[in-house]
Image (tube, grey):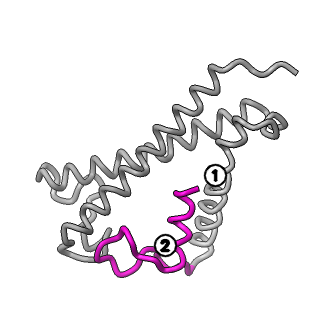
Amino acid sequence: MVFAGFHIYWALGGTFGFGDASTTVPPVHSATQWAYTVLVTGLFVVGAALPFALYRSWGRALPRWLLHGCAWIGGALLGLRGFSGLLDTALRRTGLMKNGLTGLTYQQILGVAHPDAYTLWSSSAIDLYFATGGVLYCLLALAHQRARPPTP
């Protein structure tokens, strides 16, 4: 819920956590961008409801394989996003790869050529936030998978 709350805040123009970035959400112009926005919004809704569905009685109406699959996929997506961002930052800061994994400059990814320390730390905190979410969803899936299904 906190994750979705921050995204709603950013979508409405909030900039907390983005350092000196001028905008937090790129403008949506094409049908592809709208489809992406709708998909991500749907993932937020599923992601917010999923932990409750796994441990509340109303979640038993859904197939266990669907709940587990969503939890594992959510964990993988969040983990990949978070850990790849942390690796990208580490490669940039150590000088091993000037433009990180993506090959993009700071200007291309942050909107500023020379970001201040607040922007760099904020970016790393967001990556860590995604990585933590990925780990938590995988732990959630694993714990629920190991639990015995409740008897009727």
Q: Residue at 42% across / 74% down in the picture?
A: 24
In the rendered view, tell whether residue 44 sits above or below residue 141.
below
Q: What residue is disc 1 on?
A: 48
Q: Determine the image quadrant of residue 112.
A: bottom left
Which comes before the other along the chain, label 1 or label 2?
Answer: 2
Q: Position of residue 131 (x, y in %)?
A: 41, 45
Q: Position of residue 100 (x, y in %)?
A: 23, 55
Callout 1: few (<14), some (14-19), or many (20+) C-alpha neighbours within 10 Å?
some
Question: Looking at the picture, which amino acid does disc 2 mark?
Answer: Trp
Q: Answer with the quarter of the image where residue 4 lies.
A: bottom right
Residue at the (39%, 72%) spot, across then down: 16
Q: Secondary structure at mark 1?
A: helix
The residues colored magenta run 1-29
Decide whether residue 41 is among the magenta residues: no
Task: Please give the name of the residue rendered at 33% of the width and 52% of the height, measured from the top-left corner.
Answer: 85
Q: Is residue 103 rendered to the left or right of residue 60?
A: left
Q: Are marks 1 and 2 in contact (CB under 8 Å)?
A: no
In percent of width and height, residue 69 lies at 65, 35
Helix, strand or loop for disc 2:
helix
Residue under label 2, please give it. 10
- Give the camera-side residue of 132 and 88: 132
Q: Residue at x 54, y 39 (%)?
A: 137
**Quarter holding the N terminus?**
bottom right
Q: Which corner quadrant holds the C terminus?
A: top right
- Left or right position of 23 against 12: left
Q: Is residue 112 above or below residue 72?
A: below
Q: Magenta segment: does it hold 3? A: yes
Label 2 packing within 10 angstroms: few (<14), some (14-19), many (20+): some
In screen coordinates, is 11 left or right of 62? Answer: left
- Mark 1 is on which residue type? Ala
Question: Which SS type dominates the magenta stretch?
Answer: loop
